[in-house]
Amino acid sequence: MDNNIKLRVSKIEKSFPGVKALDKIDFTVEKGTVHVLCGENGAGKSTLMKIINGIYQPDSGQIFIDEKPVKINNPIQARSLGISMIFQEMNYVPEMTVEENIFLGNLPVNKFGSVDWKEVRRSANELLKAENLPYSPATLLKDLTVSDIQMLEIIKAISYKSDIIIMDEPTSAITLKEVEKLFAKIRELKARGVSIIYISHKLDEIFQIADEITVFRDGTVVESHPREELDIETVIALMVGRKLTNTYPKEEVQVGENLLQAENLNSKAAFNNVSFHVKKGEIIGFAGLMGAGRTEVMRALFGLDPIASGSVKIKEKEVNIRNVREAINNGLVMLSEDRRRYGIIPVRSVKENTTLSFLQKVFYRLSYHSKVEHNIVTDMFTKMKVKTPTLDTSIQSLSGGNQQKVVLAKWMIRNPDILILDEPTRGIDVGAKFEIYKLMTNLVKEGKAVIMVSSELPELIGMCDRIYVMSKGTITGEIERKDFSQELIMKYATGTLISNEVK
Amino acid sequence: MKKRLIGGISMLMSVVLLGACGTTGTNPSDTSSAAKTSAANGEKQYKVAYVARAQSDSFAAWLANAVKEEAEKYPNIKLDVFDGEANDEKENSMIENAITNKYDLVIVQPNNGEAQKPYVEKVVKAGIFAITTNARISGIEGASSVDANPYEQAAVNARAAIEQIPQNAKVVVLDGPSGNFHADERRKSWKAEFFDKRTDVKIVGEQIANWNKDEAMRYMEDWVQANDKIDAVISMNDNMAAGAIEVIKDNPKYKDLLVYGVDGTAEACLLIQEGKMTSTCMQSAYDLATKLLDTSNKLLTGAEKQIDTDIGNPLVTKDNVQEYIDMHKKSGAIK
Amino acid sequence: MDLRKNNFLGTATKKYSIFMILFVLFIICSFANPNFLTANNLTNISRQLAVTTILAFGQTMLIISGMLDLSQGSVLALSGVFAVSVYKSTGSLILSILAGIITGVVCNFINAIMVSSLKTPPFIATLAMLAMARGVALLFTKGQNILQLGDFIVFGQGSLGVIPIPIIFLAVIAVITWYILKHTRFGRSLYAVGGNEEASVASGINVSNVKYKAFIINGIFVGIAGVLFMSRVNAGLPNGAVGFEMTALTAAIIGGTSFSGGIGTAMGTLAGAFIVGFLDNIMTLTNVDSYMQQIVRGAIIALAVIYDIQSKNRRTKNALGRIEDKESKIKKA
């Protein structure tokens, strides 16, 4: 039994200035298995993986591979020990070709010392063929999808003959179908005897793929069990250290008059004939596959992209929103799906990030009112349970969930009537997710309206009153809460079913 | 709407701005109009290219203007001016273009003699007359030259200074950019003609002020702080000398300060007249221009095959400054 | 609790380190040469620094918002020679300084059109302006210096009581910059735009407006600097002030303005300018040769940038630590 152990870490400790990130971690991975790590952001899983990959050095403790003690000083050394890591946010050069990417840092050279491109092409072709990938080695990375690139990373790992592959949130940016492809690949790797360490927040996925599940919390291993011994609720409870009574805090709210009504919205290319409405007290959802045009509709509504034709009424009044300022002035705000790109000013403080949407509140009578700002932000942070060391802490140093709450706080100080939330829970941990759901419920209780775009069907089903489903730029279905089911949504989303009511 | 308005206004502004440049910009080419008419009379007209070091260097600009003016006196010469923009690469390609465009004579004011030398050799090889000026490039077979001698220009000042600068004097020195032919020659001259002979004189400060008035001011201000006595400022050009004077002009402690420059700029002449500057050496762009055109004419008409000539190096002091001020008035530099 | 104290100390040292460096340098200079610590010398330094420091304030606002201006030196020369010639033809100091400012503003308005409306990278746009403005200045003066400025020199050489006028301009512009950055919506927007332009748009900031304003204010500063410069050298120098934008950028960077945008302060830039000024001054006072001075200046820039990058790395590491810390706090709560 013992000689089945591929990787073992023993009593690993690691501290960062002022905080203990890992506290005496013991953890083993067996040959040819998938070992899932879960835990909230900051629980220490990524730190441990970075230690195993040689990016960080542990303060104490020992790593064993095949029960032999090893010291891993850098990723290159890790690679030579058979360890590869596939990162959550992939950094790649868009203008690079597939073959260049595969052999990056490892290009075969001929006897003159220059790169042997013939050999590169030959081995790349061989690899792609072996893995059944349909594109040519000369394809540019920018022409591939996220999942293609992910596959490429996996191929790269295979080409290094890695027998430990670490995957950090590999499904955070790919479609359901692609997830299936990935899982098939993982099973195949497993059969070849490769050990896989898989980090994910998506609990339903975890249960599809895991052999063994280890839960991290506060830099320690809480528990480690074979999959059969666990269920989703138990894992959540282990992760947050308390039992969440209700995953979706949905409450019945009195629905009022129309707050927003969009009719026959068209853009140049992304969507056409989109009509929908949302009433006071309602949470409506937008479901659909990636690229269905949901985000594009919301961006256009919010004034970030132009609308080619159609009409928008807010509180029964026709509006013409050409930029974000006009949207805000009409009581419409939007939380973007891409927080890093459209949500935060990374180097600035949480305080400044919060008041950015409403500078008039703190800059008036020719001067800056720091106390006023402090009070506004403190109130909002208390209300939204934002955890930050100080108000002057730069937002980039907060966890994803807290960053998301700050971005939400930025909009809440405008006291908006209509809130568009585009993938509000992407990449944040269970605790923060729950708080965001809770906030949505509170908002509609106050008579506001929420539009939630999400790729996670369970949360749409859990939180919404109605769901619009989009496919290829049009709304293909509208579903009332009583009719919610994943199957129905998927049928509309894939375009196999088109509702009669929605033209 | 607002955006469009802003856009409109800005385009208007840029057009006005560009238009303004346009009108002044066309002036230089007008110089050849006289030549055109005479060409119509059937006389043989020669095309001369003047490749200037840089229009942004005030002496080079003065020289270019003077050459243009002088060219108007020669109906058989059509002169075009090119700007080397103080860049070897640029200047070299200007010379190449002149060969391609079959000029009859090319005058080169080098940015850096060694860099332009092979290109001037190309001019000669192409059977085109070449003249190098300010500073001459020596050692090109078949090329002519018109120049002032930078060593002599400094030397006339240095020789006067030997008598004027008191015993055990403390002096400061303002240098031009190192590697520049004139800067190096002038400094060499001061060493050989003055410092080697007056070992009692002490240099209490020496900095490269890059020919610039403002840099010279900064150094002079610092030197005034660091030294309780400065007897003389030895500057490699007039701009820097004027900068030093700017600093101490109202300070009674320095009313006897001796200041030496080179170039004979309008500003220096005025300062000498006021008694604030001791002397400079006139490097007259007019003299250079006159000689350049005369030489060109002689070469083009076949009177001579090769000419090397220098303009004089007159020392400008309070006694003879009026003559030069009149000259600058004529050129419009002093109003 | 300890952690918070550490963080606080960390930010405090980071925030004030530039002033500590300035102070230490001041002490060292005072001991290195007895002439350093004299009222005359300190006034001198301030006067020498006035022009480039005013430029540095313009540069600071632009860098904070993710832009920069390479055309400052050229536009300064153009503004300066226009101001000088307006003075010579009208004899009015007010009109001349207005001419300088308007010239600066027009050039920078064009910069803003290129950058904001036509989406040219600031580096390229202002590089183009660098060439254009210099060209116009030389054309206008035919490359000749304008002399005999008469009373125009009061801007650069005059004094109000004991305080030289350039220093008054410097102080006023320093305060204006501080006020803009600290006390106006526009200032706060500058940081946001430089920190993340797309997020600023999505937060309702009028980014184009912010960029125009930043360039126009820079234009005002450059125009004033042009007047001060020509007045100080008592000549209209169309080829003067070459490379001043680099000195200004140096001051801003040494003062802690981050080239990646979103970070920088007025007082930091002022300190940065004085660090360079003190060094230049003490090197000349102690007669360090020209070549050595260049090496030292280069080394200082390298050090400042290395420090900026290092502290950024440290920030990321602290950030990691803090995430873990916060999560554990949540649990405790």
Image: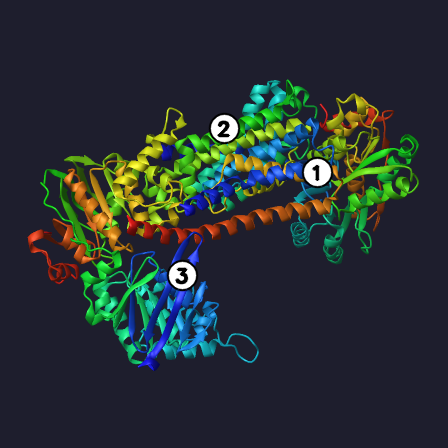
Q: Amino acid at mark 3?
A: Asn
Of residues C7 and A422, the one drawn nearer to the viewer in this rendering = C7
Of residues A130 and B310, the one drawn nearer to the viewer in this rendering = A130
Where residue B202 sits, quadrant-wise, is top right
Label 2–label 1 contact, CB within 8 A: no
Q: Helix or strand or loop: what does disc 3 sit on?
A: loop
Q: Helix or strand or loop: what does disc 1 sit on?
A: helix
From the top left corner, tell me how far across and down residue A365 is, in percent. Answer: 37, 24
Q: Amino acid at mark 1?
A: Ile
Q: Taking A500 as reference, is B301 above or below it?
A: above
Residue underneath mark 3: A91
Q: Chain of mark 2?
A: C
Q: Is residue B49 visible?
A: no
In the drawing, what numbered circle is on residue B199?
none
Q: Is residue A463 visible?
A: yes
Residue at 57% over, 42% down: C254
Where residue B326 sits, quadrant-wise, is top right
Q: Rate crowding at label 3 as few (under 14), some (14 to 19) or many (20 or more) other CA atoms within 10 Å.
A: few
Q: Rate crowding at label 1 as few (under 14), some (14 to 19) or many (20 or more) other CA atoms within 10 Å.
A: many
Query: Given this view, does label 3 or label 1 mark the residue nearer the observer?
Result: 1
Label 3–label 2 contact, CB within 8 A: no
Q: Taking A461 as reference, is A413 above or below it?
A: above
Whether callout 3 and callout 1 share a subunit is answered no
Q: How is the image coloured?
A: rainbow
Q: Does label 2 or label 1 sit earlier along the sequence?
A: 2
Q: Rate crowding at label 2 as few (under 14), some (14 to 19) or many (20 or more) other CA atoms within 10 Å.
A: some
From the top left corner, tell me how far across and down residue C51 is, in percent. Answer: 60, 32
Residue underneath mark 2: C176
Residue underneath mark 1: C282
Q: Helix or strand or loop: what does disc 2 sit on?
A: helix
- In the image, taking residue A346 as reference, residue C38 lies left or right, namely right
